[in-house]
Image (cartoon, rainbow, N blue to C red):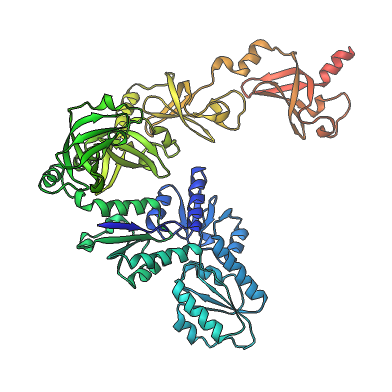
Amino acid sequence: MNILLAKTAGFCFGVDRAVKLTYQLLEQGAKVATLGPLIHNPQVVADLCARGAVVADTPAAVPPGYELVIRSHGVPRSVYDALEARGVCYHDATCPFVAKIHRIAQQAEAAGAVLLVAGDADHPEVQGIVGHTEGDVFVFGDLEALKRWKGPQTPQKPIFAVAQTTFQVTKWRECSEFLKKSYTNAQIFDTICNATWARQQEAEDLSQKCDIMVVIGGHHSSNTQKLVKVAAKHTRAVTVETASELRPEWFGNVKTAGVTAGASTPSSIIEEVLNSMSEEINDSMSFEEMLAASEEKRVHAGSIVKGIVTSISANEIQVDIGAKQTGFVKLSELTDDSGAKIEDLVKVGDELDLIVEKVMDQDGVIQLSRKKLASRKGMEEIAKAAESGEVVEGDVTESNKGGVVVTVKGAKVFVPRSQATMRRDEDYTQLVGKHVRLVVTECSGRKVVGSINKVTAEENKAKRDSVWAIVEAGIVYDCTVKSLTSYGAFVDIGGVDGLCHISELSWNRIKHPSEVVSVGDSIKVYVKDIDTENHKVSLGYKKAEENPWEQLKTSYPIGSTFHAPVVSITKFGAFVRILPGVDGLVHISEISNERVEKVSDVLKVGDMVDVKLLDVDFDKKRISLSMKALLNDDAE
């Protein structure tokens, strides 16, 4: 079966812009809400929700502290007013093509014109357009509905006509021609998105060459359903949201299949559908079955063959597979190791199991792959592991927005970011290049999903049990900083996460733990307190010998003098920092021999002053200082 993919399939500019903005905000650690589902694609919306985004139906439903993303469909003016009244921080991802229609709606209101909108009255884009004018509006779905309109109440009243950006192009042409003939005072604006027009045109052209058209997109997506209607005029058309909805019976006797996708369909889903269509038959066969089938039939793409290495060059090997054509295997199809040398992998005379990638009869050449066959065989082992729950091992080869890819026995297993690390704030991309243990949680066709943290959790439980068996106050641990929060640092003490509160990181006053430690730092901590009931450990980091209060007690007797900065001003005096982390009070009566009415008239923060130590209450950590005493000493 020949598969033709439309060049315009997938995310349009506006949707891509909104999706990238939302993922970027989430990666920056922002709390994100979207006003309604961000796009008409359940898989993308579910992934965003899994990463912490929430869907708010109205401005009033946006949770406190969340930043709102206005989706590409746009919203009425009233929504902006409501958001500003509540003080909600929002990011406007309205598609520029939609924003242009909003401006036309505003112009229609200013001109006192009737606004005609071709589109679905229930679609959020159309509702947003209508919400940008307080003038007369008429929404129609096709030419018949437009013909039923009786025209403006005042015949001389101007008419502005626009179309929803995803409106069917052929329908809009019909409606535009009718308006031109029926209303001489109608201004017609071409507002259908260029991408929409190109996508519908290509779908129509492609459908005339195919036995079936597969349209990928959300079942509730307006532009996706319009593509189905366009394609159905010339051939059988079906729509799927994901590869799992494909049906083998659709492709019986199909020689050529066309594939296109709506504007809200990510490239990952398009690729998944294409792979499922092209490998559906082979995916249902075991390695042994494919090998047997290949021996009975003529060699073709997907056949399993045995080949004898006959010669080796720098970038490929030549093999004899018992066919009239010469077989070749490129270095990139032998191994994933880009630094490997062919002579270290195979030698002349070796027998290899291979899969046929492409047969070029006119050139007398067959392209083969050992790597893809290993992946297919690995898939069988992975499928068994998925059923048994067996732990498998592999290497993390890449990362993306959704998670990481682990190569296990030559096959690729996707691990969502939520299943890659134990903590949501850990950088999962740091796993790339590491050897990991995981379980396969889903194995359906080419969709293979795994979890690293399920295995890590079990291993950590064993470590935690051993830690809790011996932990007690005073024990010192050499450990690693796992994450930072505004209130402290979490560190791993051998399988148990302990909190080192910000107050325990430094004797100085700090605003954030990052002033002292960073994620990944190796530090020495000691156990301060243990909550065995709630399994919590409180840790200390700052050293007792560095306690500035102890330094004050041992090195600075009453009467000591300091040249130190003023750090704050109050009505009753000024605080002066005599040691790092130790502030003393110069009472207003101790500033000068003369009466001081207002402290700020004499001192300001940052001034360097000479003070004398009058008294210290170490229990309450209160220090009395005097500037006046030094003046009196000088006078004497």
Q: Which of 337 and 344 is in front in this view?
A: 344
**Quadrant location of residue 201?**
bottom left
Residue closer to the observer: 49 or 302 = 302
Q: Quadrant of the C terminus?
A: top right
Horizontal side of 569 relative to 35 (left or right) equals: right
Q: Is 150 rendered above or below residue 365?
A: below
**Between residues 605 and 189, which one lies in front from this camera angle?**
189
Q: Evaluate whether residue 607 shows in this view.
A: yes
In the rendered image of this protein, does residue 623 appear above or below residue 423? above
Q: In which quarter of the image is the N terminus?
A: bottom left
Q: Where is residue 625 in the image (x, y as percent from the top left)?
A: 75, 21
Image coords of residue 478 (percent x, y): 43, 19
Q: Point out residue 308 in the picture as x, y percentages from the top left corner.
A: 17, 32
* Left or right of 580 on screen, residue 267: left
Residue 306, image x and y in percent?
Answer: 16, 37
Closer to us: 265 or 486: 265
